[in-house]
Image: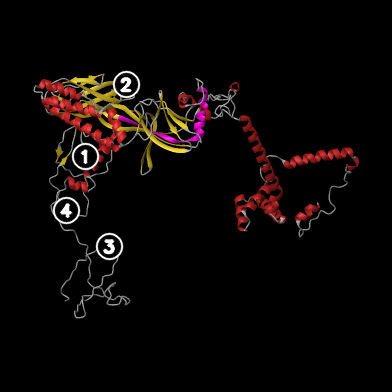
Amino acid sequence: NAESTSECILELTDFLESGEYLVCINAENDDKFYSFESENSGTNCGYKGDLSVTSGYDYPLFVQVPNFASSALFNLNQITAEEFADFRVAANNYLTDVYNKDCSTECILPVKISGINQQLEISSIKIDYSSRGREPYTDKVYSLSSTPLLVSYEGVVDLSKLGFILPSAGIKNLVISIDDEPILEKKVNIIVAPQILSLEPLNFPAGVPIVFKVNVSSNLNITDYSWNFGDGSATQVTTVNSVSHTYGNSSVYYDLQISVKDSSGSVSSKNFTILAGSPKEIVNLTISSKRIKLQNVADSLKSYPTWQSDYMKKLLKLEEYMAEVERLDKKRINIVSDSDLIKLAFELINLSIPERVFISSEMPSPFLIDAVNIDPTPLKKIGGGIGEDDLSEYKPSIAQWQMENIFGVMLTKRFEVLKDNNQISFLMNLYSVNLESSSSDESYFIANQGLDVLETDGSFDFKDSGKFSYLTIPANTKKMFTFISPSVEDLIVYISPVVSDLPYISEEIGVCNFNTVCEKDLKENYRNCRSDCKPVGRTIYWIFLILIFGLGIYTFLQVWYKNNYEKVLFEDRAHLFNLVSYVDNMTSRSTSEGEIRAKLAQQGWSSEKINYAFKKSKGQKAGMYELIPVEKLLSMLRQRESKKQVKTNPSLIPATPRSIMPQHTNLNKAQNPRQNIKRW
């Protein structure tokens, strides 16, 4: 029926790529017939039946991509968010990366909902979050847009939120570029301003004097601390980092602004949101906050092996802190008066607990040690095989043996703890050892800390040697092990066999004192003390031989080049004569060298032959630079030999010539010029 329209929806099992496709319409069976509208003007791409037939018509066949139907109302709650890669974790990561989780002023959390062009209605937004022990929420959502800004500004520009990392203080070269095109280059003086790190306390009872203390990092002395308490009171200026102030109203949040100035005049400011609450409110808030912080630390330690996390809990006194918080919470239950609650609030505020454990540095170290740092005393107890009291003479031998037989690295991880008063302190060092011994003798890993200090996972045991500990390393083996030291002092380790297996056990043991001075009176030489004594004489001898050999090779190439290069380059010497004559001729006509070279190149002469001809024409040496004038020396020797022969045989003296002109001086132009020159 030509007046009706038919349509169908293709159920595709996979998405189609964009492109050109062939659409065919067939009748269901031979009993049904259909007719289509068609047109044959312009360009046609339709076919009837066989595709091999030339296209003559178009048919009204259209393909349209459908749209999705409107979505029903659905809730995007926490469970749904976790199905979409955990929205909560993504939000926390963003706030950490951009704001370092400091939302004392504000934090903007951008959320992007993407899809095809459509109408979307968002309603009933509510985001719960935690902040300083509180669990508020927000239902405010705003549309965000970004527009590139053009800034024309004079004064101080704060680049802190742009993520720039400035180099150390001093005169630096500043280059500002747009699309890799420098627009400004200038010398600038970088001054490191003081950095305000933290303020304590942030939550406190109202109506009583509170001592606030600010923590500042600065390379220079801080001369002024300015305190704007945000309650309408006058700004106070102090020369120390603490001040006392009383907030009258309770259950009120204030913005306390602190500005500090160093001795160079640099000023930094920072705002802190603080809560002046009722005694009961502050006690409840502080207990809850400390419980959460202690539990967060305990949870973070679960990522480490059990023996490490248990040892860190022990060093942190985590269970003791948890017990103390519980004790204070039970004490709270029995308190009735505000005065006792205020005392409890200050007791809680002054209880500084761990808030975070982190790795402050990682440093791999190869097994190399200065002999000066070695204390060989433990070798006596281990069974060094020597009865001497003083083993200091074995220090160089131990260092030498370790360098030749031990390969590997020891990784040191330094752990530190941040407390809720923003003080950072050392916690422990974790040492991971990966070594290989190529020695056929058993050796010992010796550390300068006692057995009562070091902690292991129990798979191996250090043995005690007084204030030292040691571990046996089997011969020709690879060994990996990890241990902990809570000592802040540097750990010094070395590996050594028993004394009887050390090298240089002779009268020369310990002669090398590694002071970079070769002391022959101590029998130091380059064999037993290479660090102090260098084989200078032998080195000079070999350098001299190498120079002589190189000079000989160069002289040989120089003579060969002079005697053979011209023959190889011009097998027919007449070509050289003609080429030089041409260069001389053209030069005498004031033709430039470039023009001469171009004309010769057009005639098929190689650049090597042209260069050689120009050197000959100018009287320059065409061979290698003569370091040794071989021909001149040979000529001098021949002259000396001739003089000797004349002295012994006077008849060899030639008679005075009657004529120095040849009998035939006319050159036949048809003859080879070189042949005439030879006859001459």
Within 10 Å of disc 3 (Cα), the crowding (few <14, some 14-19, many 20+) is: few
Point out which mark residue 16 bears: 3
Q: What amino acid does circle 3 point to?
A: Leu
User: Which residue lies under the disc numbered 2?
Assistant: 221
Q: Mark 3 or mark 2, which is nearer to you?
A: 3
Q: Is residue 620 visible?
A: no
Contact between marks 1 and 2 (CB within 8 A): the answer is no
**338 over 66 or under it: above or below:** above
Chain part drawn in magenta: 392-416
Contact between marks 3 and 2 (CB within 8 A): the answer is no
Point out which mark residue 119 bears: 4
Q: Residue at position x 23%, y 70% from top?
A: 61
Q: Who comes first in sequence, dot 2 or dot 4?
A: 4
User: Which residue lies under the disc numbered 1?
Assistant: 108
Residue 420 picture quarter: top left
Residue at the outermost left position: 336
Question: Residue 283: horizontal and vertical position, in percent?
Answer: 14, 26
Q: Who comes first in sequence, dot 3 or dot 4?
A: 3
Question: Residue 324: horizontal and vertical position, in percent?
Answer: 20, 26
Question: Residue 204: horizontal and vertical position, in percent?
Answer: 16, 25
Q: What amino acid does circle 1 point to?
A: Ile
**79 over 204 or under it: above or below:** below
Q: Who comes first in sequence, dot 3 or dot 2?
A: 3
Q: What amino acid does circle 4 point to?
A: Gln
Q: Who comes first in sequence, dot 3 or dot 1?
A: 3
